[in-house]
Image: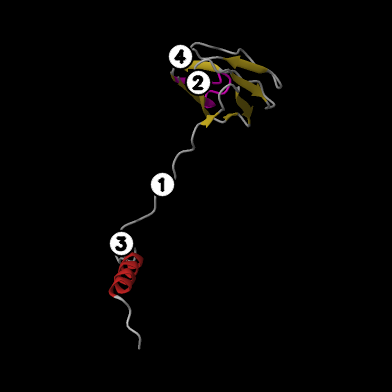
C-alpha cells in the first residue's frame, strides 16, 4: 500500500475535522430568523416610486437621498392619502384611483406616514445624504 506524504495526511485530517465540526448532537436550535425586508432604494437621480395597492403602500419602506423625488400613485380602487406623521410635513389630500402625489425631502432622517382613510396603512422613508 503506498504511503501518503505527511502534508497530504495533515490536509486530509483538517478536511475531515472541518466536515465533522457541524455534526454535533446538541439540542440547540440553529434556525435563524428571517431578516426584515430591506427598504427599496432608487438609483441616484431616479424618482423613488411607491404605489397604493390592496390598501398598502408598496413598498412600505423606501430609501431616498435628500433632494430625490418620491412619487406615490394610487393604483387601488379606493381613495387614499399620503400624510406625514413624523420627520416631515406633507399631506396629499384624497387621491382617487390613478392620482399621483410627490414629495422631495430636503434633509437626511426618517419620515413616517400613513393613509388618513385607512389608518393601518403605513409607510416610511429613510432619507440619506
Q: Residue at left 34%, top 56%?
A: 29
Category of crowding for the residue at label 1, using alpha-carbon neighbours closer than 10 angstroms: few (below 14), some (14–19), many (at least 20): few
* Circle 1 residue: 33
Task: Using the rendered view, name the quadrant where residue 58 is placed.
Answer: top right
Taking 26 as reference, is 96 left or right? right
Q: Which numbered mark, 3 or 2, is in the foreground of this view?
A: 2
Query: First in sequence: mark 3 or mark 2?
Result: 3
Q: Which numbered mark, 4 or 1, is in the foreground of this view?
A: 4
* Circle 3 residue: 27
Query: First in sequence: mark 4 or mark 3?
Result: 3
Find out whether residue 124 is within the magenta segment.
no
| Numbered label attached to residue 65 | 2
Q: Residue at left 39%, top 53%?
A: 31
* Image coords of residue 123 (percent x, y): 51, 25
CA separation, marks 4 and 1?
33 Å
CA separation, marks 4 and 2?
8 Å
Q: Secondary structure at mark 3?
A: loop
Q: Secondary structure at mark 4?
A: loop
Amino acid at each position: 500500500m503506498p504511503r501518503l506524504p505527511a502534508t497530504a495526511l495533515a490536509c486530509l485530517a483538517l478536511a475531515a475535522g472541518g466536515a465533522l465540526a457541524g455534526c454535533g448532537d446538541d439540542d440547540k436550535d440553529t434556525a435563524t430568523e428571517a431578516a426584515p425586508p430591506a427598504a427599496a432604494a432608487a438609483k441616484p437621480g431616479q424618482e423613488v416610486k411607491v404605489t397604493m395597492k390592496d390598501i398598502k403602500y408598496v413598498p412600505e419602506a423606501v430609501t431616498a437621498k435628500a433632494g430625490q423625488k418620491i412619487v406615490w400613485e394610487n393604483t387601488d380602487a379606493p381613495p387614499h392619502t399620503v400624510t406625514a406623521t413624523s420627520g416631515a410635513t406633507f399631506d396629499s389630500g384624497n387621491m382617487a384611483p390613478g392620482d399621483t402625489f410627490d414629495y422631495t425631502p430636503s434633509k437626511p432622517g426618517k419620515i413616517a406616514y400613513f393613509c388618513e382613510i385607512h389608518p393601518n396603512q403605513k409607510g416610511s422613508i429613510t432619507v440619506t445624504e
